[in-house]
Image: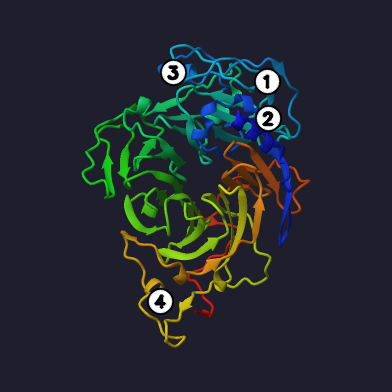
């Protein structure tokens, strides 16, 4: 009951400002995406809501629409048994300014669960999509034992589709922006089960049943620990990875059979990174044992060549994905790392975790180059703003400015500016020494050496690393925050209870949110030569530091 009450209060945002100021102007609360608290099962506290932005492009020419069936093959029959969606009791009009999707509302008593022998129905809202035009932008989110699909471009607050599960909770999900057809959404559950589905097919299907789902790691036959993070490999042609709470990461190929191959070799040393390949042509195709303890988050660089992971042991690890090689690893100042994100140019990585800090790691130097203090609790989400451009006329290569954001369990959203030519390396003055004397704990021990490839480095002293202060501190929700996403015209924040707020950028409050796929998605854009580019940053080959102050 307490959770339902807090959910209702959060949706109304009492006492919270609907705007915040930045040097370039005001960000304004444009709209909220909510759900009925009564729909959420009491076990929702076991999971934290995540949100995935998914933009469907034009439907490929000649593609036949999905026809509702009772299941023409085993995979479809299994999917419909598990993902059934209930009938709505009241029809609503088409959404204004949305993706051309109508919806129906109502409730039914049934839920779906793994291994269910009968067709289940889900409570909540569901769409009728006779007028679906084959494209649009959607929000895919999870709350407790429910998955919601919302229309990003609509002013309607309620989701257009919801799916309940009775025996397992969805934990994480990802959308493949590169997928031209076929499955483009992957979902991981706390039971270890993994599903891939086509978002377009779910929206086209008038039978209100999830169609064409592919089931991996059924009933935890390969790994029965909790899924913690999933990600598609950019440009990987259907390759995706699933991280687990036992420190293992599995590589899957959606083009291969979903049947499990349990012939991986035994892990001899839980503390060492090892890779084992499947002995048959089935999924999963490889297992990476990364750490002892949970992998909390994974993130690929924009070109898909590098994979970053953060875990319960407090280490950020970066791998060459194709070579299956550990490049470097660095430890947090305290506790576990919970989240990570790449800069659009692949030069820097953000991390956040239980030390309440945001840390910036350099791939060129293979070490931490800045840390930010401003949160009062664990940092649960970080992201670079690849659509923001510095208001400066200085185009010198050294004047590289990054804007990034972070959210935490303190309910606060923080925005930061990372100005590379203004980073100041602290120098400590030893007792009785001159200002220029460096002792054994001096910055030179941290800055003069680049870590060898394949090594894990201990945490550096905070006194040896430049400190950042937040540009904006804004309490955006009543409940702890769990993630944020940047788009070209807005920023999205989501709280643990699954309520999403869309904040319009300065000057964009009255603009239409219907945007092109490349503009909507928070990724760097490939140019005509195949290289990645971002409007937010300019390439730089090195970091320029100002003269350091003397700290007592």
Q: Work out how far the residue at label 4 is from the one at label 1, CA to CA, in angstroms.
A: 64 Å
Q: Work out how far the residue at label 1 is from the one at label 2, CA to CA, in angstroms.
A: 9 Å
Q: Tell me if 377 is positioned left or right of 431 in this view.
A: right
Residue 76 to residue 509: above or below: above
Give the residue number, with chain letter if any, for mark 4: 442
Q: What x and y, as percent, mark residue 493?
A: 62, 45
Residues at badges 1 and 2 in contact (C-beta under 8 Å)? yes
Q: What x and y, as percent, mark residue 479?
A: 61, 41
Secondary structure of the residue carrying tag 1 is strand
Earlier-in-chain disc, 4 versus 2: 2
Earlier-in-chain disc, 4 versus 1: 1
User: Which class describes the residues within 10 Å of circle 4: few (<14), some (14-19), or many (20+)?
Assistant: some
Q: Tell me if 167 is positioned left or right of 416 in this view.
A: left
Q: Nearer the viewer, residue 9 or 449?
A: 9
Secondary structure of the residue carrying tag 4 is loop
The disc placed on residue 105 is: 1
Mark 4 vs mark 2, foreground winner is 4
Secondary structure of the residue carrying tag 3 is helix
The disc placed on residue 78 is: 3
Display colour scheme:
rainbow
Q: Work out how far the residue at label 4 is from the one at label 3, CA to CA, in angstroms.
A: 61 Å
Mark 4 vs mark 1, foreground winner is 4
Q: What x and y, as percent, mark residue 409?
A: 56, 47
Give the residue number, with chain letter if any, for mark 2: 158
Earlier-in-chain disc, 1 versus 2: 1
Q: Residue at x 26, y 32 (%)?
A: 280
User: Which class describes the residues within 10 Å of circle 3: few (<14), some (14-19), or many (20+)?
Assistant: many
Q: Nearer the viewer, residue 454 or 6?
A: 6
């Amino acid at each position: 009951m307490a959770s339902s009450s807090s959910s209702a209060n959060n949706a109304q945002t009492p006492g919270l400002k609907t705007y915040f100021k930045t040097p370039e102007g005001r960000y304004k609360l444009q709209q909220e995406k909510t759900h009925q608290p009564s729909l959420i099962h009491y076990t929702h506290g076991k999971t934290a809501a995540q949100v995935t932005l998914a933009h469907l492009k034009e439907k490929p020419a000649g593609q036949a629409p999905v026809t509702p069936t009772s299941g023409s093959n085993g995979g479809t029959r299994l999917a419909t048994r598990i993902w059934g969606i209930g009938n709505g009791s009241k029809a609503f009009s088409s959404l204004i300014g949305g993706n051309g999707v109508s919806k129906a509302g109502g409730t039914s008593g049934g839920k779906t669960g793994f291994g269910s022998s009968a067709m289940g129905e889900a409570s909540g809202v569901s769409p009728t999509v006779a007028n679906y035009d084959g494209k649009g932008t959607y929000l895919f989110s999870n709350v407790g034992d429910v998955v919601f699909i919302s229309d990003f471009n609509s002013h309607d607050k309620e989701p257009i589709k919801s799916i309940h599960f009775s025996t397992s909770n969805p934990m994480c999900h990802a959308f493949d922006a590169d997928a031209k057809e076929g499955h483009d959404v992957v979902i991981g559950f706390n039971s270890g089960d993994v599903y891939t589905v086509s978002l377009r097919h779910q929206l086209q299907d008038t039978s209100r049943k999830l169609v064409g789902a592919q089931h991996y790691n059924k009933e935890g036959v390969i790994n029965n620990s909790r899924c913690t993070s999933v990600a598609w490999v950019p440009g990987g042609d259907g390759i995706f990875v699933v991280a687990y709470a036992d420190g293992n990461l599995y590589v899957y190929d959606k083009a291969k059979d979903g049947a499990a191959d349990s012939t991986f070799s035994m892990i001899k040393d839980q503390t060492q990174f090892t890779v084992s390949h499947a002995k048959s042509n089935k999924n999963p195709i490889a297992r990476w044992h990364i750490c002892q303890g949970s992998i909390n988050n994974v993130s690929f660089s924009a070109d898909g060549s590098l994979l970053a992971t953060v875990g319960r042991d407090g280490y950020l690890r970066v791998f060459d994905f194709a070579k299956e090689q550990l490049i470097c690893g660095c430890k947090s100042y305290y506790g576990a790392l919970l989240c990570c994100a790449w800069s659009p140019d692949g030069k820097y990585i953000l991390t956040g975790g239980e030390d309440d800090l945001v840390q910036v790691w350099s791939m060129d130097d293979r070490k931490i180059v800045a840390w930010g203090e401003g949160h009062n609790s664990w940092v649960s989400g970080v992201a670079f703003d690849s659509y923001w451009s510095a208001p400066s006329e200085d185009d010198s290569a050294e004047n590289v400015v990054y804007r990034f954001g972070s959210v935490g369990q303190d309910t606060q959203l923080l925005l930061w500016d990372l100005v590379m030519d203004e980073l100041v390396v602290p120098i400590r003055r030893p007792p009785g020494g001159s200002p220029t004397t460096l002792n054994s704990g001096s910055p030179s021990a941290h800055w003069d050496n680049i870590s060898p490839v394949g090594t894990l480095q201990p945490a550096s002293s905070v006194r040896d690393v430049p400190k950042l202060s937040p540009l904006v501190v804004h309490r955006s929700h009543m409940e702890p925050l769990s993630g944020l996403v940047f788009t070209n015209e807005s920023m999205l924040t989501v709280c643990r209870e699954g309520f999403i707020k869309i904040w319009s950028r300065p000057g964009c409050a009255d603009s239409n949110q219907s945007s092109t796929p490349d503009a909507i998605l928070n990724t760097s854009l490939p140019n005509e030569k195949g290289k990645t580019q971002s409007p937010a940053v300019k390439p730089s080959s090195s970091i320029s530091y100002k003269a350091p102050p003397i700290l007592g």
